[in-house]
Image (cartoon, rainbow, N blue to C red):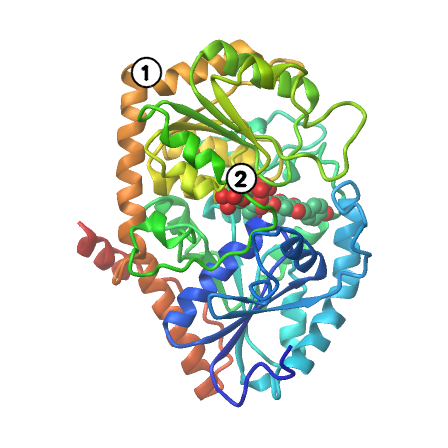
């Protein structure tokens, strides 16, 4: 690899991402939008990401270091490559927090002849210590918030103790926040509940949200028209500027931009596209729980039974667990593949954005990861929500009560889902007046997403403003906080132009 990345050129931005696929890709797409506005961009993440990208044979070795003109750089999180990070999340996050700062700092020294040439570091919320590395070099720092702006507002208010949240003595309280519907405990992010098992998460986020002044800008992977009430509600506190949706350009109708900026950590099975092509329009139920969630065997069984009984074509992504367990978690019930061979397809990993935009696909049963939700919004199809942890319960609430583009699978008292309820949800989004209404709303949101990212749209304007500020910032050496959002007036102007 080249010793120095800057080759004497000016206007560099370094993005730093946590090593999940759903974290790196929105960062890379932000990088591409910055590149389009004349900024040089590189992305740093941890070695485990390089290992996964190289293992996924759909990406060749060269592509693992250069994605759409963005150079990828890697640093160590202090753990060996075969360490089971998923089972030991708290230890993993601790190790990353301990070793990340010095390793990233060394990476900056190694790759930039003068760190002062960096206009800005952009970090994501799971590596908040990046702002300290930025401060060490006197470089301004921005955060890309990669979940809905609603989650930003909830965490900000929770960790700054601005609103009441459930406690051990009052675990069932309903949370009321500006710009959001009333939220019960099953609608809140799992990390703010008193029974959250991940001890280090509240620590990480409470430090982050109580020290927000370290970030001169907060950018959000969302768009104003999608979440305007909650975005407006944060204007007086610590504004967030939506610059998304950061999804592949083909999903946004930006066909002049052919190349997507993203990496694959798993090789996708393209045969399912041929299979989709043989299915009737708007007939297929797509099912996926993303890259991290592994469903217990009982829940796998409930889905399997519901899909069989629904008697509709289905495409189900069953990603084999990286560290299999003896209780059968994440595995298909015996005989299922044989029984359904004429009805559906099971793949280990799908080309999801191609699937969602395929005319044969009718709806999506999802864990409600935010990237999957944005991709679905941009494809204009309804969702069936089955959230698991982190932001997903709140994302499900948004789908049903704010965006109104889907239904949610209600859990039984034992926390599991019944196959009858799943089957009923499938019928609800496929046929009848409710299905029609959901589809109409979904199509309208898709149109708004496209407008937001086109030249002069709300997200495009926010990117332009950000680039203007980071570049003038470096010229003027102005250190005053730049947390201002587009003014309401500005937002209105952009909206008026859209309609
Ligand atoms: O919270 C975590 C932690 C974590 C952090 C601190 C700690 O003490 C313990 C665990 C690790 O990996 C994640 C990975 C995620 O991926 C995915 O990221 C998308 C964008 O944020 C989401 O929308 C999807 O729901 C999600 O699965 C989302 C997360 O919220 C996390
Ligand atoms: O079979 C699959 C399942 C998921 N994805 C992609 O993986 C990402 C998942 O991100 P998300 O935030 O939805 O969930 P996570 O996997 O981080 O929980 C999305 O961009 C999906 O398009 C994919 O390409 N193929």
Q: Secondary structure at mark 1?
A: loop
Q: Does 45 sit above or below residue 91?
A: below
Disc number at residue 431? 1
Check disc 1: other Cα within 10 Å, few if <14, some if 14-19, many if 20+.
few
Q: Does 145 sit above or below residue 322?
A: below
Disc number at residue 27? none
Q: Position of residue 357 (x, y in %)?
A: 36, 39
Q: Secondary structure at mark 2?
A: loop
Check disc 2: other Cα within 10 Å, few if <14, some if 14-19, many if 20+.
some
Q: Does 485 sit above or below residue 9?
A: above
Q: Earlier in the sequence, mark 1 or mark 2?
A: 2
43 and 486: which is toward the camera: 43
Q: Does 243 sit above or below residue 115?
A: above
Identified at 60% across, 14% down, the residue is 412
Q: Position of residue 128 (x, y in %)?
A: 64, 60
Q: Position of residue 303 (x, y in %)?
A: 57, 18
- Residue 224 appears in view: no
Please state the quadrant of the image where ligand 2 appears: top right
266 and 175: which is toward the camera: 266
Identified at 36% across, 22% down, the residue is 283
Disc number at residue 269? 2
Q: Quadrant of the N terminus?
A: bottom right
Identified at 63% across, 32% down, the residue is 166
The number of numbered discs placed on residues in the rendered structure image is 2
- Residue 69 appears in view: yes
**Position of 71 compared to 3: left or right?**
left
362 and 231: which is toward the camera: 362
The image quarter containing residue 312 is: top left
């Amino acid at each position: 690899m080249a010793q120095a990345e800057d080759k004497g050129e000016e206007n560099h931005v370094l993005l730093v991402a946590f090593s999940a696929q759903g974290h790196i890709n929105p960062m890379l797409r932000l990088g591409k939008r910055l590149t389009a506005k004349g900024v040089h961009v590189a992305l740093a993440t941890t070695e485990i990401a390089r290992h996964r990208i190289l293992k996924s044979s759909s990406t060749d070795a060269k592509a693992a270091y250069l994605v759409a003109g963005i150079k990828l750089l890697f640093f160590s999180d202090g753990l060996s490559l075969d360490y089971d990070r998923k089972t030991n999340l708290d230890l993993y996050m601790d190790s990353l927090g301990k070793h990340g700062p010095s390793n990233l700092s060394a990476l900056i020294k190694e790759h930039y002849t003068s760190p002062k040439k960096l206009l800005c570091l952009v970090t994501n919320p799971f590596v908040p210590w990046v702002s300290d590395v930025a401060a060490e070099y006197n470089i301004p720092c921005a955060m890309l918030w990669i979940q809905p702006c609603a989650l930003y507002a909830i965490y900000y208010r929770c960790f700054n103790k601005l609103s009441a949240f459930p406690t051990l003595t009052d675990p069932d309280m309903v949370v009321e926040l500006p710009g959001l519907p009333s939220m019960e405990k099953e609608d809140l992010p799992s990390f703010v509940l008193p029974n959250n098992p991940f001890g280090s998460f509240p620590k990480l986020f409470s430090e982050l949200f109580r020290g927000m002044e370290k970030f001169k800008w907060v950018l959000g992977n969302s768009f104003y028209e999608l979440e305007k009430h909650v975005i407006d509600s944060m204007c007086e506190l610590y504004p967030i500027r939506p610059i998304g949706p950061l999804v592949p350009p083909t999903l946004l109708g930006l066909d002049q931009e052919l190349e997507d900026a993203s990496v694959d950590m798993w090789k996708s099975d393209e045969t399912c596209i041929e299979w989709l092509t043989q299915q009737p329009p708007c007939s297929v139920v797509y099912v996926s729980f993303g890259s991290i969630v592994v469903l217990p065997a009982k829940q796998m069984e409930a889905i399997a039974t519901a899909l069989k009984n629904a008697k509709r074509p289905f495409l189900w992504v069953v990603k084999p667990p990286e560290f299999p367990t003896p209780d059968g978690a994440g595995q298909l019930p015996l005989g299922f593949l044989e029984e359904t061979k004429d009805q559906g397809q099971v793949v280990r990993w799908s080309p999801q954005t191609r699937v969602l935009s395929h005319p044969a696909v009718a709806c999506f049963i999802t864990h409600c990861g935010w990237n999957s939700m944005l991709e679905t919004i941009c494809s204009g199809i309804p969702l069936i929500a089955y959230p698991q942890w982190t932001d997903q319960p709140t994302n499900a609430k948004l789908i049903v009560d704010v965006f109104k583009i889907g239904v949610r699978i209600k859990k039984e008292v034992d926390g599991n889902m019944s196959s009858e309820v799943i089957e009923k949800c499938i019928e609800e989004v496929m046929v009848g007046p409710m299905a029609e209404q959901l589809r109409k709303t979904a199509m309208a949101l898709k149109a708004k997403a496209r407008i937001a990212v086109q030249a002069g749209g709300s997200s495009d304007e926010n990117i332009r403003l950000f680039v203007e500020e980071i570049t003038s910032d470096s010229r003027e050496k102005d250190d005053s906080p730049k947390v201002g959002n587009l003014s309401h007036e500005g937002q209105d102007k952009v909206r008026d132009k859209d309609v």
